[in-house]
Image (cartoon, rainbow, N blue to C red):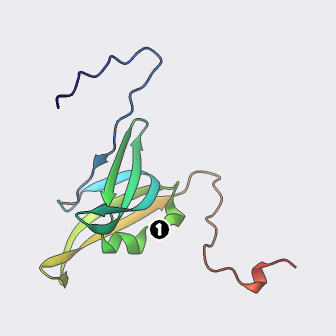
């Protein structure tokens, strides 16, 4: 089936596009943007975690989370600005033939944003009565 041509974008309207897929393939790559979501997805029959970033007003990118990223980025970072630098592969840590990808992760909360709430288990001490 052949696609038809896209319609012209009318005045006052903005075209929405799908996020680009970010791949960590060169050391020193830096991804900077606001973390919008962390969600499980299925890729090639395997469940993996996908992170979605808003990198500009009209541009989003998504990336698959590696083990190291999942250790450093969590739901408590949603809404924060993130700066993630790919440092390369640690050959001393391998799974099969794949070395672990290592990242430097920095984040900044928006000015005046409340601190993230603890998402630990609720205990009797949390109940006010």
Name the one closer to the observer, 33 or 42: 42
* Residue marked by disc 1: 74
Residue 101 left/right relative to 119:
left
Residue at 50%, 65% in the rendered image: 75
- Image position of 25 (left or right of 18): left
Residue placed furthest toward the right: 129
Closer to the camera in the image, 56 or 63: 63
Q: Quadrant of the C terminus?
A: bottom right
Q: Is residue 41 above or below residue 15?
A: below
Q: Where is residue 21 in the image (x, y as percent from the top left)?
A: 27, 50
10 Å crowding of disc 1: few (<14), some (14-19), many (20+): few
Residue 127 placement (x, y as % from top left):
80, 78
State which quarter of the image contains the N terminus: top left
Query: Residue most toward the top?
Result: 11
Q: In this view, does 121 lie to the left or right of 44?
A: right
Q: Residue at x 61, y 65 (%)?
A: 116
User: Which structural element holds mark 1?
Assistant: loop
- Where is 67 relative to 83, above or below? below
Measured from the top left, where is residue 124 in percent x and y? 76, 85
Quarter of the view holding residue 8:
top left
User: Please, which residue is most extreme toward the left here?
Assistant: 97
């Amino acid at each position: 089936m052949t696609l038809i041509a896209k319609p012209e974008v009318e005045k006052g309207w903005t075209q929405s596009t799908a996020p680009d897929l970010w791949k960590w393939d060169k050391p020193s790559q830096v991804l900077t943007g606001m973390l919008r979501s962390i969600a499980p997805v299925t890729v090639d029959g395997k469940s993996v975690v996908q992170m979605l970033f808003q990198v500009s007003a009209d541009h989003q990118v998504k990336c698959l989370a590696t083990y190291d990223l999942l250790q450093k980025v969590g739901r408590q970072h949603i809404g924060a600005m993130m700066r993630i630098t790919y440092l390369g592969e640690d050959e001393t840590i391998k799974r099969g033939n794949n070395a672990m990808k290592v990242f430097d992760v920095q984040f900044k909360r928006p000015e005046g944003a409340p601190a993230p709430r603890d998402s630990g288990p609720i205990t009797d001490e949390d109940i006010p009565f």
